[in-house]
Amino acid sequence: MVVDSHCHLDFPDFASEIDAVVERARAAGVGRMVTIGTRIRRAAEQYALAERFDDVFCSVGTHPHNAGEEADVPLADLLAAADHPKVVAIGEAGLDYHYDNAPRDAQAAGFRMHIEAARRMGLPLVIHARQADDDVAAILEDESAKGAFGFVLHCFTAGEDLARRAVALGGYVSFSGIFTFKSGAPLREIAAALPRDRLLVETDAPYLAPNSKRGKRNEPSYVVETAGVLADTLGLSREALADLTTANFFRLFARAT
């Protein structure tokens, strides 16, 4: 089976056909899905969706775009939100200097708070990093010195330096449909150079459909195409790649059993 480590199944455009979306994912060989939180105050929406399906789990957290509006949410609230049996990760949190939708100091403070929550809860952190490689790496290294925590750089589009520094800290790197684009050649080179036990694939649905579905609304069943391109990049069979990403997924998202 292939697993989809990151999707947003709570988006409105999935609502009318969520059962069909999940069923198509199962038919494609997707064994687990993690729908990702973007606002702590909306954690109940994540719970409701994850509780509906045995093979769907969720994370809770504040996306960096929303770091300003949830700057007043304390660590205690994040810890409480994460204390649900279907929550398998913290986040997504991190830094986004491309859109800068929230003040950078609020993004950084939120990022560090989510790291502390991941450390205390023993859950991995799903990290959003866009055009902020140096600052993301610096915060990860600083916080790792205070105590270990698991994490994944989701929808990876950054440079090789951040990937290597993250893996050196025990992190994982997850590739989305961008990995399949012609322009994704640099990402394929990075993936080929990383340890195989640190690689994941994802959709980031409903965004970033892989090459053959480009322009369509993305969904978890499409992650199989990304996995196939990763298999070719690593010189593995589809079956071996599925075994690899499945093992990596369960090692990181240990609660998703």
Image (cartoon, rainbow, N blue to C red):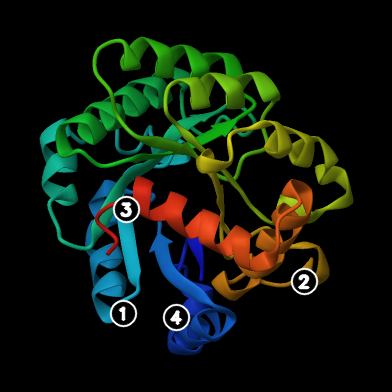
State the residue position of label 1. 53
Q: Which residue appears at 38% of the width and 23% of the height?
A: 106
Q: CA distance from mark 2 to mark 4?
A: 20 Å
State the residue position of label 4. 15
Image quarter in which the C terminus is found: bottom left
Residue 72 seen from this side: no
Looking at this rendering, what residue extends furthest in the right direction?
Answer: 182
Q: Which residue appears at 55% of the width and 32% of the height?
A: 129
Residue 44 seen from this side: yes
Q: Earlier in the sequence, mark 2 or mark 4?
A: 4
Q: Earlier in the sequence, mark 3 or mark 2?
A: 3
Q: Residues within 10 Å of mark 2 (few under 14, many from 20)?
A: few
Q: CA distance from mark 3 to mark 2?
A: 26 Å
State the residue position of label 3. 59
Position of residue 47 measured from the top left corner of the image (x, y, whole percent): 24, 66
**Circle 4 — which element?**
helix
**Circle 2 — which element?**
helix
Q: Contact, CB < 8 Å: mark 2 with mark 4?
A: no
Position of residue 36 measured from the top left corner of the image (x, y, whole percent): 40, 55
Q: Contact, CB < 8 Å: mark 1 with mark 2?
A: no
**Residue nearer the viewer, 9 or 149:** 149
Q: Earlier in the sequence, mark 1 or mark 2?
A: 1
Q: Is residue 57 left or right of residue 108?
A: left
Position of residue 249 measured from the top left corner of the image (x, y, whole percent): 43, 53
Q: Is residue 121 left or right of residue 127?
A: left
Which numbered marker is on residue 213? 2
Q: Which label sits in the foreground, 4 or 3?
A: 3
